[in-house]
């Protein structure tokens, strides 16, 4: 009998008759440990629907609308389900405004840890764990078994991302060349999700800011891409967040 922790995470033998692919995909953590999460707004519902239809997705608009949360939740359920072709989640974004992380201390893992905290907090809401210690063990196992990987735009060149769900977060901070480089990395049995808010761009050069508009023009004519725009009516983070963003829009700031 395999040893099992209080959280239900253990190592179980592979059942007789399991295919080679299923054996390769077998992981100590599966979607059974995840909470059922439902859409809170119409656009979140649309995001669930488009994802279920295996579309590539652009979810953009106001902060606090749950774009990244819902996308990551759906991606985790897919990757932890051995019946899907998806084996990994790649979260891609620019680490700093200059998009150059070579000057930061440590290796790639150390550097990417700068922006992993928000995603770790999201994952915590997605799993029913009895204690924080159990969650820390679960999250460590998710990374150790390769379910979630964090990449910066500086490290993605020259790679092919097969059997993966790729989430490009804060994509408004990437120029056209970077967005072009990322989408052409998508390999077999993979899909890509872009999340962001064009009004929150950290880009300074006007030539770079117009790049996202050109990129969106290309995506709009692609049948495999669904584009969902989130507005202030979709804000779910807090009443204060919604009140502030409405006031900011009213003042044209």
Image (cartoon, rainbow, N blue to C red):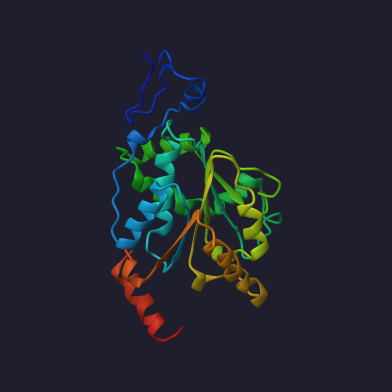
Give the residue displayed 48% in from the left and 67% down from the top. 197
The residue that appears at 71% across and 54% down in the rendered structure is: 102
Q: Is residue 186 above or below residue 242?
A: above
Q: Is residue 49 left or right of residue 175?
A: left
Looking at the rendering, which quadrant does residue 168 occupy?
Answer: bottom right
Q: Nearer the viewer, residue 50 or 10?
A: 50
* For residue 3, above or below residue 161: above
Give the residue drawn at x 49%, y 63%. 196
Say which quarter of the image contains residue 228: bottom left
| Residue 202 visible in rendering | no
Compared to 225, does 15 lie above or below?
Answer: above
Q: Residue at x 65, y 58 (%)?
A: 180
The x, y position of residue 145, in whole percent, is: 51, 32
Judging depth in this view, the residue of 220 and 91 nearest the camera is 220
Which x, y percent locates residue 137? 42, 35
Name the image quarter holding the N terminus. Answer: top left
């Amino acid at each position: 009998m395999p040893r099992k922790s209080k959280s239900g995470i253990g190592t179980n033998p592979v059942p007789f008759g399991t295919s080679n692919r299923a054996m390769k995909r077998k992981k100590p953590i599966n979607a059974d440990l995840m909470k059922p999460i439902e859409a809170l707004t119409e656009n979140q519902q649309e995001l669930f629907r488009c994802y279920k239809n295996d579309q590539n997705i652009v979810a953009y608009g106001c902060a606090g609308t749950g774009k990244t949360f819902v996308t990551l939740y759906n991606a985790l359920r897919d990757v932890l389900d051995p019946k899907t072709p998806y084996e990994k989640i790649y979260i891609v974004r620019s680490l700093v405004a200059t998009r150059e992380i070579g000057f930061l201390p440590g290796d790639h893992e150390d550097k990417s840890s700068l922006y992993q905290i928000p995603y770790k907090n999201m994952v915590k809401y997605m799993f029913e764990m009895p204690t924080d210690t159990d969650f820390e063990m679960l999250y460590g196992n998710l990374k150790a078994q390769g379910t979630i990987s964090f990449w910066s735009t500086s490290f993605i060149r020259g790679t092919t991302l097969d059997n993966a769900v790729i989430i490009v977060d804060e994509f408004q901070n990437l120029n056209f060349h970077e967005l072009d480089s990322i989408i052409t990395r998508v390999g077999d049995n993979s899909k890509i999700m872009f999340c962001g808010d064009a009004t929150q761009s950290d880009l300074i050069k006007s030539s770079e800011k117009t790049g996202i508009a050109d990129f969106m023009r290309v995506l709009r004519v692609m049948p495999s891409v669904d584009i969902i725009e989130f507005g202030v009516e979709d804000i779910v983070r807090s009443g204060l967040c919604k009140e502030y963003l409405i006031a900011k829009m009213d003042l044209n700031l």
